[in-house]
Amino acid sequence: MTSFFDDYDREVTEASQQDDKSFLSHLGSIEEGLIKWIYLCCGDRQFPADMRERIMGIIAVHRIELGCKCAPSEDTNDNAVEYAKATRSSKLVSELHSAFHKLASSRYKTRFGILGDNPKTIIMRRDDHDDPPLPPPVNNGLIRIDRDTGMPIAEGMDGYEEGLEFEVSDG
């Protein structure tokens, strides 16, 4: 099994050494970071519907922040807050850890392989499968365009000197 949830649990343990207000603030941030990975993972069209429903239920019941916020707020889940203060831990992290162990033990097969217990790995494997790598950049990211036709010109072709030059950006 992987250390994905163990890493989050360690963060919670370190945060638990703080006073209640600081601990809950830090815990809210930790949980929101985890929830983002979970949403990305569970949102895949081949993620098992029964596990998606179970996991979304765990998030709804056990997160300390209500709503989908990335910063701590006054809008909290009182039961989750009381649990966190009493145990200095996160029920959300432990319940999600258990749910993903169950998912991994089910050996559910998808288009990108068998689902494991690490949401981040599931997402990366899915993205590697679904998004083939881009070809290497032409001429170190520079493309020459023929002024008359608007078509790319490969280096060494006629008309190279007359082409326009621009950089290709990622966004």
Image (cartoon, rainbow, N blue to C red):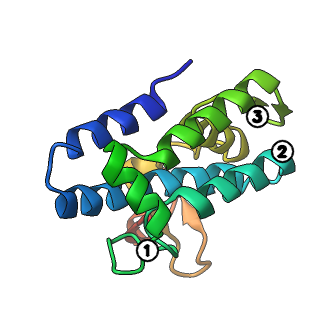
The residue lying at 71 percent from left, 38 percent from top is: 129
Amino acid type shown at disc 1 = Lys
- Residue 82, how many percent across, how many down? 39, 59
* Residue matched to label 3: 112
Q: Marks 3/1: CA distance?
A: 31 Å
Q: In this view, does 99 lie to the left or right of 89?
A: right
The residue lying at 61 percent from left, 70 percent from top is: 151
Q: Marks 2/3: CA distance?
A: 14 Å
Q: Are marks 3 and 1 in contact (CB under 8 Å)?
A: no
Q: In this view, does 62 lie to the left or right of 75?
A: right
The residue lying at 36 percent from left, 61 percent from top is: 28
* Residue matched to label 1: 69
Amino acid type shown at disc 2 = Pro
- The numbered disc on residue 48 is 2
Q: Marks 2/1: CA distance?
A: 26 Å
Query: Against 36, is 150 above or below?
Result: below
Query: Against 164, is 143 above or below?
Result: above
Q: Residue furthest top?
A: 1
Label 2 crowd (10 A; few <14 / some 14-19 / many >=20)? some
* Residue 32 visible in the picture: no
Q: Earlier in the sequence, mark 2 or mark 3?
A: 2
Amino acid type shown at disc 3 = Phe
Q: Which secondary structure lies at badge 2?
A: loop
